[in-house]
Image (cartoon, grey):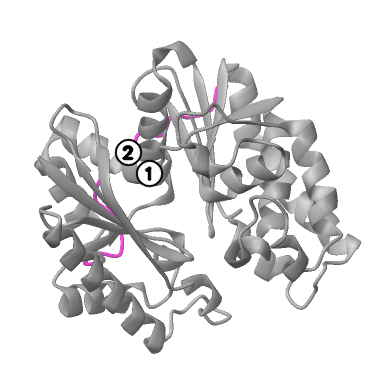
């Protein structure tokens, strides 16, 4: 069985084509289209018509590529940049009409749930009770669980790109006052969620997303060219040092640092501050960097629970209703 998934993120549309004969999604081809949607939205988060056309072309190309590699129509979803757009419904309809591919916007809590599944399958049961942190462009996802699926998930408006626009717009490098203001917001937003994680006492803390991967490389982890099976960690004390380095540099100089790519250089400081704050408040002295995240979580859930699961997800979050119809498994904090 050959499957494909399309992930529309804040910066990039990514396609992964995988073989899943033995119940494990093994990638056979990947492709990406750099659209940088988050940099094109207006002050209200609306995606302009030109960017919508670019998105239609990218999703169409992804679908055609998947077909050439022998995969069925892709499991296609969009994250925060589309989810929070005021013209989200028009964007989803345009993509479906122009590409023939149904795309849905997953709620942040469901993103956390699926990403947790990917991390759990990668790390295995030896990881024990697991806390997950995932920094995207528009949101931060947090999850905790002891089993296959999380017991607790949360999605917070602490994405690296969102915070960069809010606190550092027109500042390069940012002023000290803005850095402190961003840190205060992160602490405030994370207070309750971090309290729940501390109460649970996870054995392992794991981080996914390109933001954490690049920060880990900046902190001394092995480069990506050494492959996904090389263990990588990011210590909280090293991340604190990364913040000082990033805060002192303008964007073009950050892009010269190990691991920091030019497209993500501007938002790297905000990502580092959020990452350090969530680690500090939850008591995590280090995080394990996991190469599997939401795309692998979608593929794993499809493999394990069948096509009916994805059909229900796609129909519930395809923009045809203003409120989601699928229940989410979110545990309440302890009394």
Q: Quadrant of the N terminus?
A: top left
- Name the residue: 71% across, 25% down: 285
User: Which residue in the structure is indicated by mark 1?
Assistant: 294
> Which of the 4 image quarters holds residue 191?
top right
Q: Position of 43 compared to 110: left or right? A: right
Q: Position of 334 compared to 113: left or right? A: right
Q: Is residue 145 visible?
A: yes
Residue 97: x percent and y percent? 16, 78
Instruction: Look at the image and say whether residue 328 sits in the magenta stretch.
Output: yes
> Marks 2 and 1: CB-CB under 8 Å?
yes
- Mark 1 falls on what kind of element? helix
Dot 1, how many residues are within 10 Å of its Cα: few (below 14), some (14-19), or many (20+)? many
Residue 106: x percent and y percent? 34, 53
> Which of the 4 image quarters holds residue 151?
top left
- Name the residue: 67% across, 27% down: 286
Q: Position of 173 compared to 51: left or right? A: right
The residue stretch that appears in magenta: 320-335
- Mark 2 falls on what kind of element? helix
* Principal secondary structure, stretch drawn in magenta: loop
Q: Quadrant of the C terminus?
A: top right
User: Which residue in the structure is indicated by mark 2?
Assistant: 297
Q: Is residue 16 or residue 209 the one in the foreground?
A: 16
- Name the residue: 87% across, 59% down: 248
Q: CA distance from mark 2 to mark 1?
A: 5 Å
Residue 89: x percent and y percent? 30, 74
Q: Is residue 206 or residue 129 the one in the foreground?
A: 206
Q: Is residue 284 visible?
A: no
């Amino acid at each position: 069985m050959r499957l494909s998934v399309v992930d529309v993120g804040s910066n990039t549309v990514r396609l992964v084509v995988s073989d899943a004969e033995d119940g494990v999604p093994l990638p056979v081809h990947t492709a990406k289209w750099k659209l940088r949607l988050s940099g094109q939205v207006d002050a209200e988060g609306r995606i302009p018509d030109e960017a919508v056309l670019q998105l239609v072309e990218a999703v169409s190309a992804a679908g055609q590529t998947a077909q050439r590699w022998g995969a069925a129509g892709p499991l296609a979803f969009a994250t925060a940049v589309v989810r929070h757009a005021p013209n989200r419904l028009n964007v989803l309809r345009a993509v479906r009409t122009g590409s023939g591919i149904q795309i849905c916007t997953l709620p942040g809590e469901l993103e956390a749930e699926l990403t947790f599944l990917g991390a759990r399958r990668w790390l295995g049961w030896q990881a024990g009770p697991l806390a997950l942190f995932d920094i995207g462009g528009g949101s931060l996802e947090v999850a905790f669980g002891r089993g296959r699926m999380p017991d607790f998930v949360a999605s917070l408006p602490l994405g690296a790109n969102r915070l960069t626009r809010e606190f550092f717009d027109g500042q390069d490098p940012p002023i000290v006052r803005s850095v402190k203001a961003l840190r205060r917001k992160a602490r405030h937003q994370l207070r309750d969620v971090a309290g729940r994680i501390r109460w649970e006492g996870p054995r392992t803390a794991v981080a996914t997303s390109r933001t954490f991967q690049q920060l880990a490389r900046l902190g001394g982890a092995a480069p990506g060219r050494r492959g996904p099976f090389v263990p990588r960690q990011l210590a909280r004390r090293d991340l604190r040092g990364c913040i000082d380095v990033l805060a002192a540099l303008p964007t073009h100089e950050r892009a010269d640092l190990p691991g920091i790519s030019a497209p993500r250089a501007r938002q790297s400081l905000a990502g580092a501050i959020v990452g350090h704050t969530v680690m500090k408040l939850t008591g995590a002295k280090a995080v394990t960097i996991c190469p599997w995240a939401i795309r692998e979580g979608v593929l794993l859930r499809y493999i394990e629970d069948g096509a009916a699961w994805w059909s229900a997800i796609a129909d519930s979050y395809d923009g045809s209703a203003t409120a989601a119809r699928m229940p989410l498994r979110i545990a309440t904090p302890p009394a």
